Image (cartoon, coloured by chain):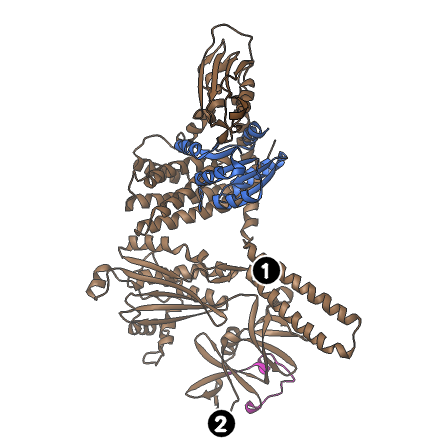
Chain colours: A brown, B blue
């Protein structure tokens, strides 16, 4: 039967990559001394599965490589070998190497053979063996298929006496005899002498034995193979027969198997051309838990029931049934909302996908820098939209690297400062309001505001003597080209990056805040929307148009007073709110809305928004309601417009544009 | 047609075994560890059980031990999937009550040959 093994490759790669992550996590725990036997077992199991799968699905190089890792892990598991720090390093590098090989196999790209050789040799070194990479596992496999040289031209005399409990292993003597008969001409006698009388016969026991002659030129190994499963549950003797019998066909099994194996091997290179496309297609897929799908189906079921109820009402409606109709509509809206939530849930992925790379990174970096630190993670199961997860990875990596490099001090400095030698980096993810917050906390030296400020003056970013709030000083860190490190390191780069971090977070509709206490450490706090597809918005009206302002950027709304308005020559108008002067953005003027009602400030409302760490007043006619809106792209349906991030369709069917607050601020500052 | 239970924590192996057997006309039930397999065995009467050895929750050896104590499975053939490196596992499996083994890596034809040998 020809089976296309490639159909299982995608699943194999997915579980193997997961297995590699498991191995990595386990090895890191092992290094921290947190490991118990189960941890080692888990690592071993992952390696074992990868080996079994790669051999079966035709990735012999991966199978060979994993084989030696498995051997090493097996010895550790059995307590024969202790794994030291260096050994764990070798295994971690081997995991990286396997990942590279796996990537090469799944994408059809080239394997870095030198890398494989280096890691293979390192593993061999630990095991203290000399044999080369290509021979290790493959010979072992081949050996089992190669028939042994011993064969008897005259045939074999076989005696086969199963033990009493033979049947209780699922064995069947008939199977054994039938199999022997496939090797050559078989003659035999059954010995029934041990069968007891009927009364004392136990049908579950075995009382029979056989004496047989197998004729022809049969390999002894082939006979041993037949008995391999039952040798413990029976007495078997195989000896050469004296007289010559008719020639029987040789064992056909081995050559056949060899042939089918080459057939499989031939298939894989031919198919590799398609691999790239397949990998690309897979990258945009998402794995969803069955329970989420079940929820969804449930919800749709409810919706269908409500719909049929409503349509029945509609067929024969009179005012006496108005109450029923309203009830149905309430149900409909509830189910629609639940359905929406369920659908959104499908895109939600736990942040552990992003967090999982950090233990390794922290370990490697601390080793490189000669610092000592531990990583503590909380809230790995917090779920975020898949797109957000994908885009937040790099900024997070940068922030963590930054904390390790610039935050945590060298062990000697820490001791001198009266701190524990071991630094701590914390990653926390949690819900707050409608947002997800990710905090990166370190107990390092903190941010020296004075240094930052002076550097800002030096770079011409602030005027000397300017009074800045803490947040404004910290925001300088995210300015392009800003770097406080006296020496450029290859760990957190050279000041390019922090601005990119901020830009990436902003592009996800999020924000970053910095808190720091000199000498005690820093917290970088990232706030992200749960999803990019739906937004909590405040609708406002300007003339006959409706606009949506994202709730995250709104601080408050005020009824403006005339006396608080200031006109600053050349800098537009500002509004004095408490002790702060807010620049005013008039939406009506900006978008040239002819029928904007409020011209005088006191006739309209001022929505105070925050963007780029500064506050602004957005002037509108009126506030309408708050609602969740589904974001529709303006770009793909029309074209990009400055100051607008998208559009949505309101309950009455009209279109409302969603204001891009950051964009608005940029537009107005350009005009000024 | 014969009903076969295949137990493996690796989805790709499980799918490959199931697909191969179904293609040959057998009915197949899949389980991802020993415990789930044991649960599945209570509601069904399998004619053959093929199980991996290294699995989380309950490994193959423990599973075989438990399954053999069930009245329904006293004489049922149980095959384990094992690799060359774990030769001692074969012995351990036999003691637990396994009928035989299939050595990994194997291809669909080899698998079918063994299955046919055992249940025809």
Q: Which secondary structure lies at badge 2?
A: helix
The residue sitting at the bottom extreme is A563
Q: Quadrant of the N terminus of chain A?
A: top right
Instruction: Name the image quarter holding residue A407.
Output: bottom left
Q: Is residue A150 above or below residue A446?
A: above
* Magenta stretch encompasses residue A95: no
Say which mark, if any, is on residue A315.
none
Q: Is residue A426 above or below residue A279?
A: below
Question: Disc 2 versus disc 1: distance between alpha carbons?
Answer: 56 Å
Which chain is mark 2 on?
A: A
- Give, as a single range, the part of the protein colored magenta: A584-603
Q: Nearer the viewer, residue A67 or A59?
A: A67
Residue A459 in sight here:
yes
Task: Check disc 1: other Cα within 10 Å, few if <14, some if 14-19, many if 20+.
Answer: some
The residue sitting at the top extreme is A243
Q: Which secondary structure lies at badge 1?
A: helix
Residue tagged by mark 2? A563
């Amino acid at each position: 039967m020809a089976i296309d093994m490639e159909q299982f490759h995608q699943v194999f790669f997915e579980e193997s990559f997961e297995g590699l992550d498991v191995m990595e996590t386990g090895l890191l725990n092992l290094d921290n001394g947190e490991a118990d036997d189960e941890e080692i077992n888990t690592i071993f199991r992952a390696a074992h599965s990868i080996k079994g799968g790669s051999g079966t699905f035709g990735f012999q190089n991966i199978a060979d490589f994993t084989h030696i890792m498995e051997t090493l892990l097996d010895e550790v598991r059995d307590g024969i070998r202790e794994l030291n720090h260096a050994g764990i390093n070798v295994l971690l590098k081997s995991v990286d190497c396997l990942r590279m090989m796996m990537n090469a196999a799944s994408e059809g790209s080239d394997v870095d053979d030198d890398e494989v050789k280096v890691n293979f040799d390192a593993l061999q070194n630990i095991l203290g063996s000399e044999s080369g990479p290509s021979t290790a596992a493959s010979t072992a496999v081949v050996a089992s298929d190669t028939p042994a040289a011993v064969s008897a031209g005259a045939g074999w005399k076989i005696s086969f006496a199963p033990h009493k409990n033979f049947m209780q292993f699922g064995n069947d003597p008939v199977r054994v005899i039938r199999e022997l008969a496939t090797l050559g001409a078989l003659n035999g006698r059954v010995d029934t002498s041990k069968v007891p009388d009927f009364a004392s016969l136990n049908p579950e026991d075995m009382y029979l034995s056989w004496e047989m002659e197998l004729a022809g030129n049969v390999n002894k190994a082939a006979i041993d193979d037949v008995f391999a499963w039952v040798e413990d549950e029976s007495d078997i003797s195989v000896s050469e027969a004296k007289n010559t019998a008719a020639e029987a066909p040789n064992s056909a099994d081995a050559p056949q198997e060899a042939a089918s194996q080459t057939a499989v091997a031939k298939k894989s290179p031919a198919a590799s051309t398609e691999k790239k496309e397949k990998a690309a297609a897979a990258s945009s897929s998402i794995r969803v838990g069955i329970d989420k799908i079940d929820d969804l189906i449930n919800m749709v079921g409810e919706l269908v029931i409500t719909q049929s109820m409503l349509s029945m009402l509609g067929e024969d409606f009179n005012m006496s049934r108005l109450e029923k109709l309203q009830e149905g509509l309430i149900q409909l809206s509830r189910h629609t909302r639940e359905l929406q939530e369920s659908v959104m849930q499908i895109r939600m992925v736990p942040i552990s996908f992003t967090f999982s790379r950090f233990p390794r990174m922290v370990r490697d970096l601390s080793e490189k820098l000669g610092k000592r630190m531990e990583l503590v993670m909380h809230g790995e199961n917090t779920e975020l939209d898949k797109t957000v997860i994908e885009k937040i990875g790099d900024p997070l990596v940068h922030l963590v690297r930054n904390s390790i490099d610039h935050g945590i001090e060298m062990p000697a400095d820490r001791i001198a400062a009266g701190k524990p030698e071991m630094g701590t980096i914390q990653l926390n993810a949690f819900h707050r309001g409608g947002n997800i917050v990710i905090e990166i906390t370190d107990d390092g030296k903190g941010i020296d505001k004075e240094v930052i400020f002076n550097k800002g003056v030096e770079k011409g970013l602030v005027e000397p003597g300017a009074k800045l709030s803490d947040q404004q000083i910290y925001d300088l860190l995210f300015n392009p080209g800003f770097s406080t490190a006296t020496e450029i390191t290859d760990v957190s780069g050279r000041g390019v990056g922090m601005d990119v971090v901020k830009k990436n977070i902003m592009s996800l509709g999020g924000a970053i805040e910095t808190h720091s206490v000199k000498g005690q450490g820093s917290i970088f706090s990232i706030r992200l929307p749960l999803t990019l597809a739906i937004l909590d918005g405040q609708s406002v009206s300007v003339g006959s148009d409706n606009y949506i302002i994202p709730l995250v950027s709104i601080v408050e709304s005020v009824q403006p007073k005339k006396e608080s308005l200031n006109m600053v020559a050349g800098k537009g108008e500002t509004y004095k709110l408490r002790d702060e002067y807010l620049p005013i953005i008039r939406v009506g003027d900006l978008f040239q809305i002819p029928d904007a009602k409020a011209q005088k400030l006191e006739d309209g409302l001022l929505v105070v928004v925050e963007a780029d760490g500064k506050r602004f007043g957005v002037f509108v006619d009126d506030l309408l309601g708050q609602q969740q809106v589904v974001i529709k792209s303006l770009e793909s349906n029309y074209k990009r417009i400055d100051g607008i991030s998208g559009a949505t369709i309101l309950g009455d069917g009209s279109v409302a544009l969603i204001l891009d607050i950051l964009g608005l601020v940029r537009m107005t500052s350009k005009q000024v | 047609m014969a009903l076969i239970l295949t137990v493996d924590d690796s989805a790709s192996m499980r799918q490959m075994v199931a697909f191969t057997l179904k293609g040959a006309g057998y009915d197949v039930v899949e389980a991802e560890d020993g415990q789930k397999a044991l649960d599945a065995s209570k509601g069904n009467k399998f004619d053959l059980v093929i199980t991996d050895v290294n699995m989380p929750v309950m490994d193959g050896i423990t599973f075989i031990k438990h399954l053999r104590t069930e009245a329904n499975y006293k004489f049922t053939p149980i095959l384990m999937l094992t690799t060359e490196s774990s030769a001692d596992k074969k012995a351990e499996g036999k003691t637990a009550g396994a009928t035989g083994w299939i050595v990994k890596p194997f291809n669909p034809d080899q698998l079918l040959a063994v299955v046919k040998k055992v249940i025809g």
